[in-house]
Image (cartoon, rainbow, N blue to C red):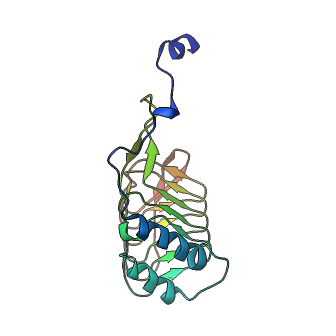
Amino acid sequence: MDAIFLQQAQIDLSKFNTGDYNAGPLWKIALWYLVSYLFFDSGLAYPSNFKRNLLILFGAKVGKGIVVKPHVRIKYPWKLSIGENSWLGESVWIENFVDVEIGNNVCVSQGAMLLTGNHDYKVESFPYRFGSIVLEDGVWIGAKSVVCPGVVCESHAILTVNSVTSKTLEAGGVYSGNPATYVRARNMIG
């Protein structure tokens, strides 16, 4: 296996560049980083409605009744949509280089990561590759779980604690592990 690897090109990070990717105006990014540091990534428990209004001010589409706990990191709010009555738990990290859509009544638990960007390890310059993330209504992303670029979590799917998905989670399914695999149907009482 080592002989095969040695015959291939090697990664050269000196050749890395972001290509034509543009997150937005530099002033907007800088201002958001300051606001994010002071009010979102802070350990202080600012009211969720205050945080909601800041997200809207920076271009996010946000429904009513959201809960945003302390230490939440959102890369670019102008690339974020959150429905009504959804929760972002403590230390959630939304690395949204491209769009992230979170539906209604979605719970993203403590320490979970939504990652829309990655590197293409097959290319010498290690360029970015992106994929939007969609969490449909009623989805639950368990604590310390990771949702990778390009994933759709269909209605009421669950990704259990400390799991990783790089593939679509089908509606009403419970998924667990790394890589996450289907465990059972989500049976709801009520």
Q: Is residue 77 visible?
A: yes
Location of the N terminus (image quadrant):
top right
Which quadrant holds residue 54? Answer: bottom left
**Horizontal and vertical percent position of residue 43:** 67, 77
Residue at the left extreme? 20
Q: Which residue is drawn at 37% across and 56% down?
A: 170
In this rendering, the answer to whether 3 lies above or below 186 is above
Q: In this view, does 111 lie to the left or right of 149?
A: right
**Horizontal and vertical percent position of residue 159:** 50, 59
Counting every numbered tag in the picture gives: 0
**Horizontal and vertical percent position of residue 57:** 39, 82
**Horizontal and vertical percent position of residue 33:** 52, 69
Q: Residue at x 57, y 76 (%)?
A: 40
Which quadrant holds residue 162? Answer: bottom right
Q: In this view, does 104 lie to the left or right of 2?
A: left
Q: Nearer the viewer, residue 131 or 38?
A: 38
Q: Which of 122 and 175 is in front in this view?
A: 122
Q: Residue at x 51, y 22 (%)?
A: 10
Q: Which of 82 and 188 is in front in this view?
A: 82
Q: Nearer the viewer, residue 134 or 12?
A: 12
Location of the C terminus (image quadrant):
bottom left
